[in-house]
Amino acid sequence: MTVTFPTPITIAANSPGGLIVDLRLDNIFDNLLNVSFSAPNGVTVSQVTAQNGELKEQEIEDLVGIVATNPPPANNQFVLQTTRQGNVTIQVDNNTVFEDFDKANPACTANNFSCIKAGQLLEVDLRVMAAGGAFLAKKVELEDDAADDELEGVIFSVDDATHFKIVVVEELRDVANVTVGNPINVTVQSGSSFRVNTNGLTVPTGLLNAFQNATDTTQLVPGQEVQIRVRNLTAGPPIAVTTDRVRLRMSRFSGKVASPIAASNFNVDNLPSLFASPIQVQSSSQTKFEGVSGVSGLAVGDSVSLRGLLFKNTPNSALIASKVRKR
Protein backbone atom coordinates (compact mmCIF):
# COMPACT_ATOMS: atom_id res chain seq x y z
CA MET A 1 0.00 0.00 0.00
CA THR A 2 1.41 3.37 -1.01
CA VAL A 3 0.10 6.51 0.64
CA THR A 4 0.67 9.95 -0.87
CA PHE A 5 0.85 12.75 1.68
CA PRO A 6 -1.11 15.86 0.65
CA THR A 7 1.37 18.13 2.42
CA PRO A 8 4.92 17.64 3.71
CA ILE A 9 5.18 15.98 7.12
CA THR A 10 7.45 17.86 9.52
CA ILE A 11 9.17 15.84 12.25
CA ALA A 12 11.09 17.72 14.94
CA ALA A 13 13.47 16.26 17.50
CA ASN A 14 11.97 15.58 20.95
CA SER A 15 8.48 16.50 19.72
CA PRO A 16 6.08 13.56 19.96
CA GLY A 17 3.48 13.29 17.22
CA GLY A 18 1.51 10.90 15.09
CA LEU A 19 -0.28 10.29 11.81
CA ILE A 20 -3.96 9.53 11.27
CA VAL A 21 -4.64 7.37 8.21
CA ASP A 22 -8.30 7.59 7.20
CA LEU A 23 -9.57 4.77 4.96
CA ARG A 24 -12.90 5.34 3.20
CA LEU A 25 -14.14 1.77 2.84
CA ASP A 26 -16.99 2.82 0.56
CA ASN A 27 -14.40 4.22 -1.88
CA ILE A 28 -11.59 1.65 -1.75
CA PHE A 29 -13.97 -1.31 -2.29
CA ASP A 30 -15.82 -1.77 -5.57
CA ASN A 31 -19.01 -3.79 -6.13
CA LEU A 32 -16.99 -7.00 -6.48
CA LEU A 33 -15.12 -6.29 -3.21
CA ASN A 34 -11.87 -5.60 -5.04
CA VAL A 35 -9.64 -3.20 -3.08
CA SER A 36 -7.94 -0.13 -4.56
CA PHE A 37 -6.07 2.14 -2.16
CA SER A 38 -5.44 4.57 -5.02
CA ALA A 39 -9.17 5.21 -5.53
CA PRO A 40 -10.18 8.90 -5.38
CA ASN A 41 -10.72 9.99 -1.77
CA GLY A 42 -9.90 6.46 -0.65
CA VAL A 43 -7.03 7.27 1.71
CA THR A 44 -6.21 10.53 3.48
CA VAL A 45 -3.45 11.24 5.96
CA SER A 46 -3.22 14.00 8.55
CA GLN A 47 -0.58 14.84 11.11
CA VAL A 48 -1.30 15.04 14.84
CA THR A 49 0.91 16.85 17.31
CA ALA A 50 1.01 16.34 21.06
CA GLN A 51 -0.63 18.84 23.40
CA ASN A 52 0.34 18.68 27.06
CA GLY A 53 1.84 15.26 26.49
CA GLU A 54 -1.31 13.82 24.90
CA LEU A 55 -2.22 12.99 21.32
CA LYS A 56 -5.70 14.38 21.74
CA GLU A 57 -7.04 13.41 18.35
CA GLN A 58 -5.71 9.87 18.57
CA GLU A 59 -8.34 7.80 20.34
CA ILE A 60 -9.36 4.16 20.33
CA GLU A 61 -13.04 3.54 20.94
CA ASP A 62 -14.95 0.42 21.96
CA LEU A 63 -11.92 -1.81 22.59
CA VAL A 64 -13.31 -5.05 24.03
CA GLY A 65 -11.28 -7.62 25.91
CA ILE A 66 -10.73 -9.73 29.01
CA VAL A 67 -8.83 -8.51 32.06
CA ALA A 68 -5.65 -10.57 32.37
CA THR A 69 -4.95 -12.76 35.40
CA ASN A 70 -1.21 -12.25 35.18
CA PRO A 71 -0.36 -9.54 35.95
CA PRO A 72 -3.46 -8.78 38.02
CA PRO A 73 -4.91 -5.26 38.11
CA ALA A 74 -2.80 -3.08 40.43
CA ASN A 75 -1.52 0.45 40.85
CA ASN A 76 -4.19 1.99 38.57
CA GLN A 77 -3.10 -0.26 35.70
CA PHE A 78 -4.40 -3.46 34.11
CA VAL A 79 -3.77 -5.60 31.05
CA LEU A 80 -6.62 -6.16 28.59
CA GLN A 81 -6.38 -9.29 26.43
CA THR A 82 -7.83 -8.64 22.95
CA THR A 83 -7.90 -10.62 19.71
CA ARG A 84 -7.06 -7.65 17.43
CA GLN A 85 -4.47 -5.67 19.41
CA GLY A 86 -3.07 -8.45 21.58
CA ASN A 87 -2.38 -7.62 25.23
CA VAL A 88 -2.84 -3.90 25.92
CA THR A 89 -1.57 -2.27 29.12
CA ILE A 90 -4.03 0.40 30.23
CA GLN A 91 -3.70 3.14 32.82
CA VAL A 92 -6.51 4.97 34.60
CA ASP A 93 -6.51 8.36 36.31
CA ASN A 94 -8.90 10.60 38.20
CA ASN A 95 -10.72 11.50 34.96
CA THR A 96 -11.46 7.91 33.94
CA VAL A 97 -15.20 7.13 33.96
CA PHE A 98 -16.26 3.70 35.27
CA GLU A 99 -19.67 2.33 34.24
CA ASP A 100 -21.94 -0.58 35.18
CA PHE A 101 -19.68 -2.32 37.70
CA ASP A 102 -22.35 -1.88 40.36
CA LYS A 103 -24.91 -3.65 38.14
CA ALA A 104 -22.92 -6.89 38.17
CA ASN A 105 -21.79 -6.47 41.75
CA PRO A 106 -24.13 -4.32 43.90
CA ALA A 107 -21.42 -4.18 46.56
CA CYS A 108 -19.17 -2.27 44.17
CA THR A 109 -20.96 1.04 44.55
CA ALA A 110 -17.69 2.95 44.20
CA ASN A 111 -17.55 2.26 40.44
CA ASN A 112 -13.79 2.84 40.40
CA PHE A 113 -10.54 0.98 39.74
CA SER A 114 -11.05 -1.26 42.77
CA CYS A 115 -13.97 -2.90 40.92
CA ILE A 116 -11.77 -4.25 38.10
CA LYS A 117 -11.08 -7.98 38.51
CA ALA A 118 -9.24 -10.56 36.43
CA GLY A 119 -11.50 -12.43 34.01
CA GLN A 120 -14.01 -9.62 33.52
CA LEU A 121 -15.17 -8.60 30.04
CA LEU A 122 -14.62 -4.86 29.60
CA GLU A 123 -15.19 -2.26 26.91
CA VAL A 124 -12.67 0.59 27.04
CA ASP A 125 -12.27 3.95 25.30
CA LEU A 126 -8.61 5.02 25.19
CA ARG A 127 -6.40 8.01 24.55
CA VAL A 128 -2.88 7.48 23.26
CA MET A 129 -0.40 9.45 25.36
CA ALA A 130 2.60 10.96 23.64
CA ALA A 131 5.00 9.95 26.41
CA GLY A 132 5.99 6.40 25.47
CA GLY A 133 2.76 5.77 23.57
CA ALA A 134 0.95 4.74 26.76
CA PHE A 135 -2.81 4.05 26.75
CA LEU A 136 -4.96 6.06 29.16
CA ALA A 137 -8.57 5.00 29.71
CA LYS A 138 -11.25 7.64 29.17
CA LYS A 139 -13.99 5.15 30.00
CA VAL A 140 -14.02 1.61 31.41
CA GLU A 141 -17.35 -0.23 31.13
CA LEU A 142 -18.16 -3.67 32.53
CA GLU A 143 -19.98 -5.84 29.99
CA ASP A 144 -19.84 -9.20 31.79
CA ASP A 145 -18.43 -10.35 35.11
CA ALA A 146 -17.10 -13.50 33.42
CA ALA A 147 -15.93 -13.92 29.83
CA ASP A 148 -17.43 -16.41 27.38
CA ASP A 149 -17.40 -17.01 23.62
CA GLU A 150 -18.88 -13.99 21.86
CA LEU A 151 -18.78 -12.81 18.26
CA GLU A 152 -19.36 -9.28 17.07
CA GLY A 153 -20.59 -8.66 13.56
CA VAL A 154 -22.61 -6.55 11.15
CA ILE A 155 -26.04 -7.84 10.18
CA PHE A 156 -26.44 -8.22 6.42
CA SER A 157 -29.66 -10.26 6.30
CA VAL A 158 -32.70 -10.85 8.54
CA ASP A 159 -34.28 -14.03 7.24
CA ASP A 160 -37.22 -14.77 9.55
CA ALA A 161 -38.28 -14.50 13.19
CA THR A 162 -35.44 -16.68 14.49
CA HIS A 163 -32.68 -16.41 11.88
CA PHE A 164 -30.32 -13.66 10.70
CA LYS A 165 -26.84 -13.41 9.19
CA ILE A 166 -23.76 -11.43 10.21
CA VAL A 167 -20.22 -10.86 8.97
CA VAL A 168 -17.79 -11.25 11.87
CA VAL A 169 -15.76 -8.14 12.70
CA GLU A 170 -14.40 -9.20 16.08
CA GLU A 171 -14.03 -12.18 18.42
CA LEU A 172 -13.95 -11.66 22.16
CA ARG A 173 -11.45 -14.53 22.26
CA ASP A 174 -10.46 -17.07 19.64
CA VAL A 175 -13.48 -19.17 18.68
CA ALA A 176 -12.65 -22.43 16.90
CA ASN A 177 -13.47 -22.47 13.15
CA VAL A 178 -14.27 -18.72 13.08
CA THR A 179 -12.17 -15.85 11.75
CA VAL A 180 -12.90 -12.18 11.15
CA GLY A 181 -14.70 -11.78 7.82
CA ASN A 182 -16.64 -15.04 8.06
CA PRO A 183 -20.37 -14.92 7.28
CA ILE A 184 -22.35 -16.57 10.09
CA ASN A 185 -25.89 -17.97 10.08
CA VAL A 186 -27.39 -17.13 13.48
CA THR A 187 -30.30 -18.92 15.14
CA VAL A 188 -31.97 -17.16 18.07
CA GLN A 189 -32.96 -19.57 20.84
CA SER A 190 -36.34 -19.35 22.50
CA GLY A 191 -36.10 -17.12 25.56
CA SER A 192 -33.07 -15.21 24.27
CA SER A 193 -32.34 -11.79 25.72
CA PHE A 194 -31.88 -8.63 23.66
CA ARG A 195 -29.72 -5.89 25.17
CA VAL A 196 -28.39 -2.47 24.21
CA ASN A 197 -24.89 -1.30 25.03
CA THR A 198 -25.75 2.38 25.32
CA ASN A 199 -22.16 3.52 25.88
CA GLY A 200 -23.52 6.28 28.08
CA LEU A 201 -25.89 7.60 25.40
CA THR A 202 -29.41 8.55 26.37
CA VAL A 203 -31.65 6.51 24.06
CA PRO A 204 -35.33 7.43 23.57
CA THR A 205 -37.38 5.14 25.79
CA GLY A 206 -39.54 3.83 22.94
CA LEU A 207 -36.55 2.67 20.88
CA LEU A 208 -34.72 1.24 23.88
CA ASN A 209 -37.70 -0.70 25.20
CA ALA A 210 -38.66 -2.02 21.77
CA PHE A 211 -35.23 -3.59 21.35
CA GLN A 212 -34.76 -4.84 24.91
CA ASN A 213 -38.25 -6.33 25.07
CA ALA A 214 -37.86 -8.18 21.77
CA THR A 215 -38.28 -11.95 21.77
CA ASP A 216 -37.21 -12.55 18.16
CA THR A 217 -35.55 -10.76 15.23
CA THR A 218 -38.30 -8.18 14.68
CA GLN A 219 -36.08 -5.30 15.92
CA LEU A 220 -33.06 -6.28 13.81
CA VAL A 221 -32.16 -4.56 10.51
CA PRO A 222 -29.20 -4.88 8.12
CA GLY A 223 -26.37 -2.54 9.08
CA GLN A 224 -26.73 -2.96 12.83
CA GLU A 225 -23.61 -4.10 14.67
CA VAL A 226 -24.41 -6.74 17.26
CA GLN A 227 -22.59 -9.00 19.68
CA ILE A 228 -23.89 -12.55 20.02
CA ARG A 229 -23.11 -15.06 22.76
CA VAL A 230 -22.25 -18.44 21.26
CA ARG A 231 -24.17 -21.38 22.75
CA ASN A 232 -23.59 -23.83 19.92
CA LEU A 233 -21.47 -23.67 16.78
CA THR A 234 -21.42 -25.88 13.70
CA ALA A 235 -18.42 -25.53 11.42
CA GLY A 236 -19.37 -24.73 7.85
CA PRO A 237 -19.54 -23.70 5.29
CA PRO A 238 -21.79 -22.06 6.15
CA ILE A 239 -20.89 -21.58 9.81
CA ALA A 240 -23.98 -21.80 11.99
CA VAL A 241 -24.27 -20.40 15.51
CA THR A 242 -27.04 -20.65 18.07
CA THR A 243 -27.25 -17.74 20.48
CA ASP A 244 -29.19 -16.87 23.63
CA ARG A 245 -28.17 -13.20 23.75
CA VAL A 246 -28.02 -10.41 21.18
CA ARG A 247 -26.45 -7.13 22.27
CA LEU A 248 -26.76 -4.00 20.09
CA ARG A 249 -23.50 -2.11 19.68
CA MET A 250 -22.29 0.96 17.79
CA SER A 251 -22.64 1.04 13.99
CA ARG A 252 -20.32 3.09 11.79
CA PHE A 253 -21.04 4.26 8.24
CA SER A 254 -20.84 7.24 5.91
CA GLY A 255 -23.43 9.01 3.77
CA LYS A 256 -24.67 12.37 2.57
CA VAL A 257 -26.87 14.80 4.45
CA ALA A 258 -30.44 14.86 3.10
CA SER A 259 -33.51 16.86 4.04
CA PRO A 260 -35.18 17.48 6.33
CA ILE A 261 -32.62 19.12 8.61
CA ALA A 262 -34.05 20.14 11.99
CA ALA A 263 -32.56 21.62 15.14
CA SER A 264 -31.00 18.35 16.31
CA ASN A 265 -31.96 15.79 13.66
CA PHE A 266 -31.23 15.25 9.98
CA ASN A 267 -31.54 12.53 7.38
CA VAL A 268 -28.73 10.79 5.49
CA ASP A 269 -28.88 8.99 2.17
CA ASN A 270 -26.37 7.77 -0.45
CA LEU A 271 -25.60 4.99 2.01
CA PRO A 272 -23.78 1.71 1.41
CA SER A 273 -26.19 -0.78 -0.21
CA LEU A 274 -26.41 -2.74 3.04
CA PHE A 275 -28.47 0.03 4.66
CA ALA A 276 -32.05 1.07 4.05
CA SER A 277 -32.10 4.67 2.88
CA PRO A 278 -32.71 7.24 4.25
CA ILE A 279 -31.78 7.00 7.94
CA GLN A 280 -32.76 9.64 10.47
CA VAL A 281 -29.80 10.81 12.59
CA GLN A 282 -30.79 11.99 16.06
CA SER A 283 -28.19 14.11 17.87
CA SER A 284 -28.07 15.47 21.41
CA SER A 285 -25.72 17.22 23.80
CA GLN A 286 -23.92 13.88 24.07
CA THR A 287 -23.08 13.84 20.35
CA LYS A 288 -19.50 14.72 19.43
CA PHE A 289 -19.22 16.79 16.26
CA GLU A 290 -16.02 17.01 14.23
CA GLY A 291 -15.46 19.44 11.37
CA VAL A 292 -18.67 21.26 12.24
CA SER A 293 -20.07 22.73 15.46
CA GLY A 294 -23.48 21.05 15.24
CA VAL A 295 -26.43 20.18 13.04
CA SER A 296 -26.89 23.85 12.15
CA GLY A 297 -23.57 23.74 10.30
CA LEU A 298 -24.66 20.96 7.97
CA ALA A 299 -26.16 21.40 4.51
CA VAL A 300 -27.88 19.01 2.13
CA GLY A 301 -25.23 17.11 0.18
CA ASP A 302 -22.50 17.29 2.85
CA SER A 303 -20.58 14.04 3.31
CA VAL A 304 -20.59 12.78 6.89
CA SER A 305 -19.22 9.81 8.79
CA LEU A 306 -21.43 8.59 11.60
CA ARG A 307 -21.16 6.47 14.73
CA GLY A 308 -24.08 5.49 16.91
CA LEU A 309 -26.79 3.01 17.83
CA LEU A 310 -28.98 2.01 14.89
CA PHE A 311 -32.60 1.15 15.68
CA LYS A 312 -35.46 -0.08 13.55
CA ASN A 313 -38.07 2.67 13.43
CA THR A 314 -40.99 3.96 11.36
CA PRO A 315 -40.86 5.30 8.68
CA ASN A 316 -37.04 5.23 8.67
CA SER A 317 -34.44 3.56 10.86
CA ALA A 318 -32.96 5.91 13.47
CA LEU A 319 -29.33 6.40 14.45
CA ILE A 320 -28.77 7.75 17.96
CA ALA A 321 -25.52 9.50 17.17
CA SER A 322 -22.47 9.51 19.42
CA LYS A 323 -20.27 11.08 16.72
CA VAL A 324 -20.88 13.08 13.53
CA ARG A 325 -17.87 13.97 11.42
CA LYS A 326 -18.22 16.29 8.44
CA ARG A 327 -15.80 15.16 5.79
Image (tube, rainbow, N blue to C red):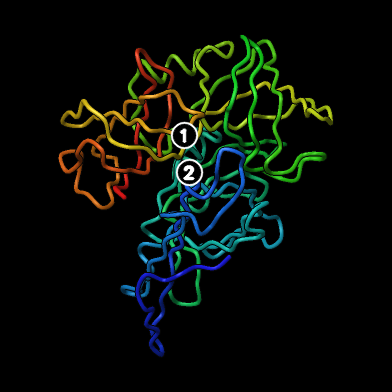
Compared with 91, 284 (above or below) is: above
- Which residue is painted at 43% across and 72% down in the image? 18
- Nearest the viewer among 67 and 59 is 59
Residue 184: quadrant of the picture: top right
- Nearest the viewer among 291 and 97 is 291
Q: Badge 1: how crowded within 10 Å, few (<14), some, or many (20+)?
A: some
The label number, if any, that marks residue 272 in the structure image:
1
Compared with 150, 14 (above or below) is: below
Q: Which residue is mark 2?
A: 26
Residue 188: quadrant of the picture: top right
Residue 208: image location, x then y, percent: 41, 20
Label 2 – label 1 distance at C-alpha: 7 Å
Q: Quadrant of the N terminus?
A: bottom right
- Which residue is painted at 35% across and 19% down in the image? 205
| Tally of numbered tags | 2
Tell me if label 2 and label 1 are in contact, CB under 8 Å: yes
Compared with 27, 52 (above or below) is: below
Which tag, 2 or 1, sits closer to the chain's start?
A: 2
Q: Badge 2: how crowded within 10 Å, few (<14), some, or many (20+)?
A: some
Which residue type carries mark 2? Asp
Compared with 84, 263 (above or below) is: above
- Outermost residue toward the bottom? 13
Residue 107: image location, x then y, percent: 52, 37
